[in-house]
Amino acid sequence: MEVLELINQKYDVKITKWKENDVIETDKGLKRVRFWNEYSLLQWHVSWRDECSINPYLITDKMIRTKSNQTEVEYNKGWFTLHDEVTTLSPMIEEEQKWGQLLAKVLNYGLHSSYGEEITSCSFPSLDKYEPLANTFKNFTKDTQKIIYTCFDEAKSRVAKAQYIRKRNKDVTAPLLDSISSLYQARTHNRVLFWQGTMAKPERGYTQFCGFIKEWKRIHGEASLTQVLNEINRSFEMKKNGQLELLLADFLLPWELVELLDSAQHCQSIEECQANYEVFRARWNENQEMIRFLLEWHNEGKANRT
């Protein structure tokens, strides 16, 4: 039986049109079909979506139940699920408290969650293999080569600090998370905020979350992000449970330099290498600013208590 027939049969919706990218139009609005071939992964995604919704004003893209109250339908040696599809991006300004509450729930859930094939986001390559390359790329200008070599020395210091932080917090477990990587995942419909999850395997650590809060700061500024972090900290207590230090450790890891050095080995021209370098410098500076910002946020209020 085809997917459309199964949807009409199993769900309380009537399909009017199949759009692209597994989105369908129905008499009850747009819906997204997701296809799964691993049942444990499907159930993990069902669980976090159900647990982390905050009715009535902020919901996740939960699995719509079938007429018989099932979260999935068997199909083609696997399963499919049906979800509301919301296309309007959410405002973030003046909604910081609500988004902070959702993120706190997701992070708290991740502390107590498990999944069979966990992906850990803390595996960083050794910089030793890059050291002989850092000062020899001919496709960079001489001035750029000097800056890269200086950044390389600083990168080694950053890695050492990250390793020290992780060693000091070796008994602290990072949360297991669905991808939280972009503000594009935050939507809104009829004054209800809506978070769009993924189908990816969960990852333990903050690598993708780093990208999310960097984007928030870049677009909405430090004051707005401070409100979000303050709200997260009310129930997740990042400042007390070692989680903020793990987050800082992820920011310290100089992935941007590794990616620049990897790409430089395949550059075809000075122009291409210089373009990659400009991207690197922007990311390097942004990460430095995020580290400064998080340290200042961590120290907020300490002066008043001493």
Image (cartoon, grey):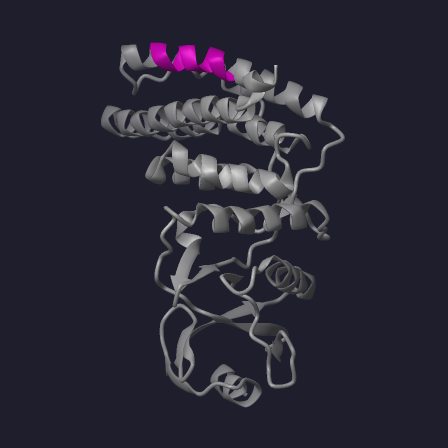
Quadrant of the image containing the N terminus: bottom right
Q: Position of residue 297 (x, y in %)?
A: 51, 27
Query: Up-down: is 154 above or below 224?
Result: above
* Relative image position of residue 30 (x, y in whole percent): 40, 74
Assess whether residue 149 is covered by the magenta stretch: yes
Residue sitting at x 41%, y 58%? 187
| Residue 242 part of the magenta segment | no
202 relative to 256, above or below: below
Instruction: Give the residue drawn at x 29%, y 20%.
Output: 139
Give x and y (percent) for residue 6: 54, 86
Image quadrant occupied by the C terminus: top right
**Residue 288 occupies which quadrant of the picture?**
top left
Q: Nearer the viewer, residue 200 or 58?
A: 58
| Stretch in magenta | 146-155
Outermost residue on the left side: it is 271
Q: Residue at left 38%, top 23%?
A: 285
